[in-house]
Image: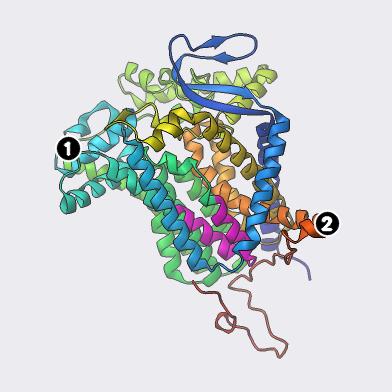
Amino acid sequence: MSKTFAEKFESFARIVISILMIYLMGSLSLISMFSTTGMQTIEEGQDVDSVVIRIFKAQESVIFYHDDALINIIMLAVFGILCFLILPKMKKLSLRTELIFLTVWTLLGGIIWVNSSMVEPTFDSAYVTEYAKKFASGDYSGMSDTYLQEYPFQLGYIFLAEILYKIASANFGEPETTIFIQVMNVVFLALIYNGIVLINHELFEDKRIRHMTVLLFAVCTQPVIFCTFTYGIIPAFAFAVWALYLEILYFKKNKIWLGIVSALCLGLAVMIKNNNYIVMIAMLIIAFIQMLRRKQLLKDAAYLVLAGVMGLSLLPAAISHYEKKSETELGDSLPYVSWIAMGMCEGFRAPGWYRGTYTTTKFEELDMNQEAMRAYSENLLHERLDYFKENPQYRKDFFYRKFTSQWNETSYQSIWNNTVRKQYKEKGKLSQWVCYDGVDKVKSYMDFYTQLIFWGCLLAVIGCLKSKEFLRVSMPLVVLGGMLYHLLAEAKSQYAISYFIMIVGISAYGLCIGYDIFSKKIQRYPKIAKFFPEEAQTIPAPVPADVVPKTETGTKQTENSETSEET
């Protein structure tokens, strides 16, 4: 039976996404075996400038280290085998049990960490939480500040933080610290973990993939440590993950309310952190391809439009809300092309990292004139593109270092964010050990763990290339968008942490593929093989909701006729 155009297009899209991700994850996996990017504060006298290594004095210093590849290979094998040993012991765990465990484990660990670190916000995180606190009490004087004119998109997160302040004040009195917001980050992180577990549960009939996802999240340290950073990254990504999960459910179950809630979550994700336009674009691509294949044009087109409208409207609505409340017009803001131009320039920390010379400082020099700033940024961008064209070796070095400075910085600034901020009070023993006394051990663990995740993700996208189920590339498509976007725009490893969390979820599929290969090879050694029992290696694609198979008698098989696992 010949394929329709829609089926061919879907297959083409899946193959392109998989191949691009194989290239990026293959490169990153290999790079991680030979080098690691470090992130720390370098004080006066600690900087080094030699032919061996360059370490710059900076509060946010990016350092490129070479690793011992042999040790990395050994530790990759050790971490992988440990996962393979634990996986069979999880086979009797139900979905409900795993979700409850992961939620309690994350909340417990996160709350202990937040109260041990006792971090007080500084710089951007301090600005947005202070605005939220004032707005919650009816003081909108901050709307006239230059900061909000330059960064009006921060009002989306400020809107969420204001709601949290009002809830906290109404129930516990006005908060004296931001610890409660950090605790809410932990709650949102638990929602992210649960959402990704549920995505894998829906996309794969092999329960081992779900078990592996829970295991990997249970031993993932970076996101929990990162929760002290009071910014929009974690809460926004929670809404993004659930928007994606509900979109997948919508296309599998054909229930309109799922599409509506998915679109709402997407709008909130973009409102809180506008980098989630990447997630929006990925979801719209998925929806468009599914619309072509499913031939339910009216319903799917309505969802497509609703998701786009929600994604584009809630952030402007939040900005407009505050302008009306304060009776203030924010006026011109930095044009988006300025961030792309800056991303193409050398930064003080690494290529493409933040440098106000090309953005806010220049904008103020031009009297906050948006058109003048746009012209300057477009000219700068053209100059940089011409320079890349004329200097191919420099271009390769620039993007190599920009890419590795973000994705191979295996702490994703989680530890750094707990050392450069002010303190409400002295750190507890746990935080003191993680951030200072035992920091080398913690970073080594993060490095070995992340290498395992990278290789697992590589195996997963190879599996996606062979699979015929398009929805399995949903999370890889989001990660692909994040990687490509941050190759162009501002680079910063803490922006990569949300995508890293998704990479962990993707890698669970790859590690199960790795388990099948390993267990098959090890069967020739019975004494060892008993610890790695062979499992069913076929991971069938779920049947799309609009394609209902027939039984041998010719009657239609309904969803209710199948035995489903408890939820």
Residue 503 placement (x, y as % from top left) = 58, 47
Q: Disc 2 on helix, strand or loop?
A: loop
Q: In this rendering, would 369 be left or right of 395?
A: left
Residue at which label 1 appears: 140
Residue 287 visible (yes or no): yes
Residues rendered magenta in the picture: 191-216
Q: Does the magenta stretch include residue 199?
A: yes
Most foreground residue, 503 or 110: 110
Question: Please, is residue 522 above or below residue 176 in the view?
Answer: below
Query: Furthest residue to the bottom?
Result: 553
Which amino acid is tagged 1? Tyr
Residue at 29 percent across and 36 percent down: it is 128
Residue at 38 percent across and 57 percent down: it is 264
Q: In this rendering, would 259 be left or right of 75?
A: left
Q: Residues within 10 Å of mark 2 (few under 14, many from 20)?
A: few
Residue 515 placement (x, y as % from top left) = 71, 55
Residue at 67 percent across and 17 percent down: it is 391
Q: In which quarter of the image is residue 234?
A: top left
Most foreground residue, 425 or 127: 425
Q: Disc 1 on helix, strand or loop?
A: loop
Q: Looking at the image, is mark 1 or mark 2 earlier in the sequence?
A: 1
Q: In this rendering, would 23 be left or right of 523?
A: left
Q: Main secondary structure of the magenta part?
A: helix
Residue at which label 2 appears: 525
Query: Furthest residue to the right?
Result: 524
Q: How far apart are marks 1 and 2 (CA)?
A: 71 Å
